[in-house]
Amino acid sequence: MKMALLQHMFLSILVVAAVIVVLLKNKPRKSKYNLPPSPPKLPILRNPSARQLPYISLHHLARTYGPIIFLQLGEIPTVVVSSARMAKEVMTTHDLALSSRPQIFSAKHLFYDCTDVVFSPYGPYWRHIRRNCILELLSAKRVQSYSHVRVEEVAPLVDRITGFFRRRDYDRHGFQKMLEEYQELLGGFSIGDFFPSMEFIHSLTGMKDHQKENKATESHKYLVDVLLDVLKTDYGDMPLTRDNVKAIILDMFAAGTDTTFITLDWGMTELVINQKATERAQAEVQSVVGERKFVQESDLPQLQYLKAVIKEIFRLHTPAPVLGPRESMEDITIDGYSIPAKPNPESCVDPESFRPERFLNENSDIDFKGQDFELIPFGAGRRSCPVIAFGNASVELALAQLLHSFNWELPDGIQPKDLDMTEVFAITMHRIANLMVAAKPRFS
Ligand code: HEM
């Protein structure tokens, strides 16, 4: 049911587009602006008792008011768009005007006053760090050069599942805990962000105390310090402070790790439920990799069904479904702010089912690189994820290896319907419960 809601919310032609939240810089006056339709009273975007996630609430609103909605959230006038056509408007026609980000409270504290790439406002600083990150860390050539690291990391993953688990360095330095805190702090909507003139709300909600605790953790500093000098030397013309560099490094770890993990976690959930898809994917991996124990990156281009599986995971469990919020830098007209045609529910066949086949044959050219607005798990336009190839390479290799090394089943007595598919709303969408599966090694 939840998945059905998720699908319908994204109102797309064939697959899903993500919801885009645009925070308007100035408070619009009705007389001057032809505002998009708006619900008569403030919607409840999070109802913990009903476990209703904000994007599901937004879905309900979109079904009633159309794919472009105006919401006055506290002091912040907000526009939410939720269709492929609207996403295209925002991220192509109006991409420049909407390329800034709001300075949310937790990001200000976590990312050293929003001096990272993800939360930095649009301007020369953001352009400088994004360009340098792509050049020095994330270019196609660099991503390719990290290939041996990905391959080396997949082997311990197999060991871990087989039971020969060796404790890795990142556990020792509290990496997992750091990511959990980051998740929690950036999670969902923090009420204080919608009342910027009332700073004290952050104290009432406990946000402020949490920030203090977070800052004191020495192990995070150590992890960051190790990499500090490497980046520092690469920023000549606009020198960065130590904190700027830390913010950027934190971005790289947090933005990269969590999204990849979530994709694999939801992917394994769907595959263990959909045994036919698993068998087809395994047969494909087997036909390419043969009796070799480990998948190589050079095998990946031949794994067409696996690619369809990954697109289907991105569609059904978009890791960051609300993308990053955008902030308007000038007045714009999106679709004349009028209500566009209602979504066509027929357009995405069987939207709540996990069916990788929808991305084969005539739809195989639908991709997630920001051109096809029905599927934008990495966003699109100036603020899109700068490392789609990196994110995808890690997911593809790890998933191929998991399918190659093991047969996957639910534990005895557990049916697919028993799995808790609840998602936790944060900046990225984790499963609420751990996935318990039985992994049977395929090689002795
Ligand atoms: C499955 C993997 C990944 C997914 C699904 C993903 C998704 C996203 C999304 C949805 C955005 C926001 C786009 C927008 O607001 O329009 C984003 C931005 C970003 N991502 Fe990724 N990402 C992934 C992997 C990575 C990796 C591996 C890194 C770095 C090592 C990374 C670094 C970033 C950065 C720095 C931004 C901010 C871009 C900006 O605001 O200029 N991501 N990503």
Image: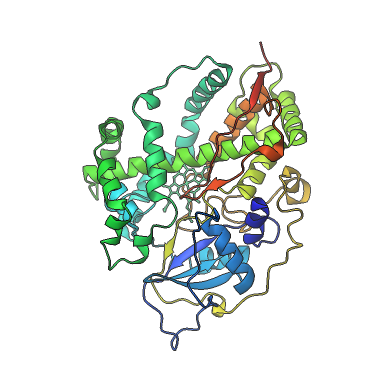
Question: Could you say which is closer to the camera, residue 360 or residue 424?
Answer: 424
Residue 257 pos. (x, y %): 46, 37
Residue 436: quarter of image: top right
Residue 434: quarter of image: top right
Q: Is residue 90 visible?
A: yes
Q: Is residue 106 above or below residue 403?
A: below
Q: Is residue 197 above or below residue 189?
A: below
Identify the residue shown where x is 27% and y is 51%. 208
Q: Quadrant of the C terminus?
A: top right
Question: Could you say which is closer to the camera, residue 127 or residue 156?
Answer: 156
Residue 399 pos. (x, y %): 61, 31
Identify the residue shown where x is 46% and y is 76%. 332
Identify the residue shown where x is 58% and y is 46%. 422
Q: Is residue 327 left or right of residue 365?
A: left
Q: Is residue 283 left or right of residue 84?
A: right
Looking at this view, name the residue that lies furthest to the top.
444
Q: Is residue 168 above or below residue 67?
A: above
Identify the residue shown where x is 62% and y is 54%. 375
